[in-house]
Amino acid sequence: MYFFRALGVILSTIVHGSVSVLLSFFDPTGVKQNSVAQRWARSLLSIGGVKVEVQGLERIQPSGSYVIVSNHLSYFDTPVVLANIPVQFRFMAKEGLFKIPFLGTHLARAGHIPVPQQDPRAAIKTMTAAAEIIRKKGISVLVFPEGGRAADGVLQEFKEGAVYIGIKAGVPIVPVALRGTWAVLPFGSGRIKPGRVKLQIGEPIPTASLTMRDRGHLNAAIREQIVAMLD
């Protein structure tokens, strides 16, 4: 059963990725590619036997622009968020993923944003560019502020990239808490297990009146909301 789930995920990723790359030549806005990504995400949940309970969806306007900030437990976190929050998404991904054949082409042409890991100056330029994309295109960006998956499932400290982007773009930051994805696909495991996941959307935090001097307090407020939802 594990083999067939893994095979299903691979095939779905290849098919949807190919369709997305093809659409990129005809849809410079990325709207259709986002729809393909959401269908891909829903297919992965179906293949994996993952049921998602969503709370707080009324706090999100489908036409709105947000920086969506979530805890990070598993590779299944992105499909869960993509499949269940109906906004135009782009996400921040490690720069190395853009160098993987086929996957890197899909990520680049879909408008996702590579994040350099070892160059702080380049990282700031990337975050500034992400804020500009949000303003110009009216989209939302998904950020995992822990900087990587939590190996033990425990919430880590937050880096300030998400709040930097939110303040620069002047859009609300939406805290999101995920529970259950670690059990579905644990850190270091290649086996997908059926299970139930809860996605809880917190209260959006406005940033229009904030400056970079507020980023420490804002970062703490986001983390506190996510901690409260997880508890």
Image (cartoon, helix red, strand yellow):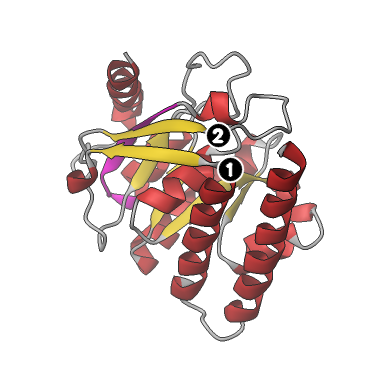
Q: Is residue 83 above or below residue 2?
A: below
The quadrant the C terminus occupies is top left
Chain part drawn in magenta: 169-179
Residue 102: within the magenta? no
Q: Earlier in the sequence, mark 1 or mark 2?
A: 1
Provide residue 163's location: percent of width, then percent of height.
38, 35
Amino acid type of the residue that numbered disc 1 sits on in the rendered structure = Gly
Q: Residue at x 63, y 18 (%)?
A: 151
Across and down, in percent, residue 17 comes to 66, 65
How many labels were placed on the picture?
A: 2
Marks 1/2 in contact by CB < 8 Å: the verdict is yes
- Secondary-structure class at tag 2: loop
User: Given the current orientation, which residue lies at the most extreme bottom position?
Assistant: 26
Is label 1 in a helix, a strand or a loop? Answer: helix
**Residue occupying image coordinates x 28% and y 49%:** 170
> Residue placed farthest to the front in the image?
1
Residue at 69%, 71% (x, y): give it. 18
Q: Is residue 186 left or right of residue 223?
A: right
Residue toward you, 48 or 61: 48
Residue 198 spot, x, y in % from top left: 37, 31
Nearer to us in this view, 56 or 127: 56
Amino acid at the residue labelled 2: Pro
**Image quadrant in which the N terminus is located:** top right
* Position of residue 213 in the picture relative to residue 71 (left or right): left
List the residue tagged with mark 1: 48
137 is higher (above) or lower (below) than 225: below
Residue 194 numbered tag? 2
